[in-house]
Amino acid sequence: MTPIAVLIHVQNVQEGLKWYKKAFPMAEEIYLPAFDFTLLSIGTFSIEIVQADAKVGQGKCGSVLYWLVEDFDQAIEHFERLGAKLYRGPMMLDQGMRMCQVEDPFGNLIGLKGL
């Protein structure tokens, strides 16, 4: 199995999409007219900003996707400039790696790991 997508639940899809395009500038925006849906593609992986509802709300619900970053400190600064807040960490791992979680403006968590 290979991870293919992460769904990020938000109250306002357009605001969420705008923020995530800035947060992941390497992502290609792809519009799917048959579904009137826009996703952000990074290689074979997609970030899909979807409407929060009664079944799946926005915010911290237990699962956190971690992104491997080349420059850990720079990644934290990038997300903080966009309005994310450091939520947990940073903490040291083995071989000089560090990890943390940042909270996006919608209450969701983004995990970061790197040197």
Image: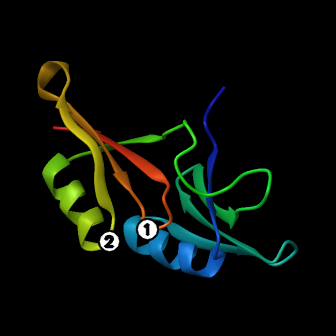
Instruction: Give the SS element for disc 2.
Output: loop
Q: Are marks 2 and 1 in contact (CB under 8 Å)?
A: yes
SS state under label 1: loop
**Tag 2: Cα neighbours inside 10 Å, few (<14), some, or many (≥20)?**
some
Residue 11: x, y in percent? 65, 71
Above or below, 17 against 110 in this view is below
Q: Position of residue 71 (x, y in %)?
A: 17, 49
Residue at position x 50%, y 65% from top?
Answer: 106
Q: Residues within 10 Å of mark 1 (few under 14, many from 20)?
A: some
Q: How is the image coloured?
A: rainbow
**Circle 1 sits on which residue?**
105
Q: In the rendered image, which quarter is residue 22 located in?
A: bottom left
Can see residue 111?
A: yes
Residues 33 and 10: in front is 10
Say whether residue 25 is visible.
no
Q: Position of residue 2 (x, y in %)?
A: 62, 31
Judging by the rendered image, the residue that carries numbered circle 2 is: 83
Q: In the rendered structure, which amino acid carries the disc numbered 1?
A: Pro
Compared to residue 63, the image places residue 70 above or below, namely below
How many dots with numbers? 2
Give the residue type that dot 2 points to: Gly
Camera-side residue of 19 and 40: 19
Residue 50: x, y in percent? Answer: 69, 64
The image quarter containing residue 66 is top left
